Amino acid sequence: MSRERGRRKLMLRLPDIRHLLANVTNETLGEMFEAYDLAGDALDRFRAQSPWEDKLIAEYEQLCREIEQEVTFYCTDR
């Protein structure tokens, strides 16, 4: 379930490779999809807290960007 949510989130964030993400099924990408979903959920929670935890928000924004880059590289460098 978390993997599919992560896949859908990445498909929205990475429209240039959406077609690749839609059809790929392997364990490596599945784990990246799941990690992206979990990191995105955590980021949403941190943003909803008051007061904001700026350090955690920045850390998780960076983590999401890194996963996006990793997924892009994995999908386009094969």
Image (cartoon, grey):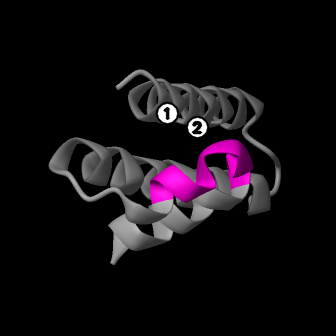
Q: Is residue 42 visible?
A: no
Please tell me whether mark 1 sits on a helix, a strand or a loop. helix
Q: Quadrant of residue 45?
A: bottom right
Type of amino acid at the residue the image marks with label 2: Cys
Q: Could you say where residue 31 lies in the image, as x and y percent from the top left?
A: 26, 48
Residue 40 lies, in percent from the top left, at 58, 53
- Which secondary structure, mark 2? helix
User: Is residue 2 among the parts visible in the rendering?
Assistant: yes
Question: Position of 55 compared to 70: left or right?
Answer: right
Q: Position of residue 75 (x, y in %)?
A: 43, 35
Q: Is residue 11 left or right of residue 58?
A: left
Quadrant, the N terminus: bottom left
Residue at 68% across / 46% down in the picture?
14
What residue sits right under mark 2 in the picture? 64
Q: Residues within 10 Å of mark 1 (few under 14, many from 20)?
A: some
Q: Which residue is mark 1?
A: 67
Examine the image and state in which quarter residue 8 appears.
bottom right
